Image (cartoon, rainbow, N blue to C red):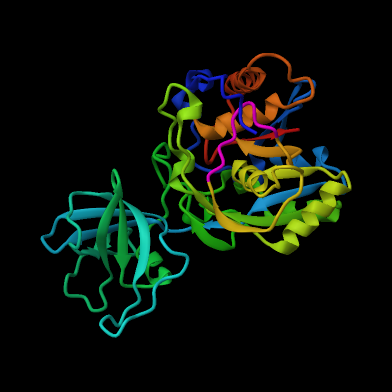
Amino acid sequence: MSAPKNKKILTADFDYYLPPELIAQQPAKPRDQARLLVLDRNTERLEHRHFFELDHYLTAGDVLVLNNSRVIPARLLGHKITDGRMEIFLLSHYQQKPLAASPKNKHPTNHWQCLLGGKIKPGQAIILDRPTASNSVSRKKNATLAITATPLKKLAEQTWLIAFNATDEKIFSYGQTPVPPYIKTNQNWTAADYQTVYAATAGSVAAPTAGLHFTNRLLNKLKRRGIQLEYLTLHVGWGTFAPVKTDYIQEHPMHPEFVTISPATARRLNQAKQAGRRIIAVGTTTVRALEAGCDKAESFLKPKSDWINIFIYPGYDFKFVDAMITNFHLPKSTLLMLVAAFIEQAPIGTTKNKGALLIKSAYTEAIRKKYRFYSFGDAMLIS
């Protein structure tokens, strides 16, 4: 359920100021050394911990649900035959499976929706530049087996349907791992640092960042203590991080993202929920996947393999998630609005705009304590 239709919520209610020096430029090392701000929604109490102490707040029988999507090297550089430089950013497959090769074309046609930087006309081929060991690109126009990207039609501003003459594996070998623009340097991190240790299924253009804090050692420790681990897949799209530009959040359009929840995973999660065990979502992506997969009439999770565009903001009635682990999010972002909605639904959540007020209060304390923000930053546990 969304907020009442007659209650418009101002985007400005989710704005805050962050000192630029608190934007994390590299991950904590080891990962689980990141700080952890613990918020109890009922008492409004805050505690300051480290992520490796997460087990202090979990009990045997709790279920951690994690998003195992893997970040793809979505940033591609290339040039037109006329030598004009082009940049391509992979967003999502236009079709679930590439088209087979035709008699006229010995290569499969692989369709993607992409952001395209630079001027181009439909049908004008782009030749991808091969990355080199020095992180620059090679632009040998006559190289054999060149990968070409052909824009077919414009879908929206800067968004095109593009046909590649290669498989995903080959395309990815030409790509670079994208990172948010607020991360200014890569001197102290690698592409592996921008993947969760349990990443399995390729498809995201940005990391499900709440999961970056887990190490294999911590996951094994939790399992030994009786914490059940379950995995689903939500391929993070660029739209997740798109800023809300409308005056009222209800007017913001959400972009679709692809979710897979297997029948076996849904069955185990439903059994845990019915037994009264806590379902703890790791990240806003996992929250969205679980809530989108729920039957609207009851707290029953269904298997899913489909696109979703659920927008969770204050007034939403959560059906499945009991607690969540999340990072510190950008001002006016849909992710911050989701967190506020989760806080607002606490049993004592009767104060007007409680979710927005309490999350801003927690962020103010985090800023005072100099927590690190955004993708490589610290984490929160909200229960």
Q: Along the horizontal axis of the image, is 320 left or right of 184? A: right
Q: Along the horizontal axis of the image, is 348 left or right of 149? A: right
Q: Position of residue 359 (x, y in %)?
A: 63, 23
Q: In which quadrant will I find the C terminus?
A: top right
Residue at (50, 36) in percent of width and height:
24
Q: Is residue 313 magenta?
A: yes
Q: Position of residue 239 (x, y in %)?
A: 45, 43
Residue at (35, 65) in percent of width and height:
174
Q: In which quadrant will I find the N terminus?
A: top right
| Residue 331 seen anywhere in this rendered image of the structure | no
Q: Is residue 89 magenta?
A: no
Q: Residue furthest bottom?
A: 103
State the extent of the magenta-drawn residues as a range: 309-317
| Residue 277 seen anywhere in this rendered image of the structure | yes
Q: State the image quarter where residue 73 is shown.
A: bottom left
Q: State the image quarter where residue 253 is shown.
A: top left
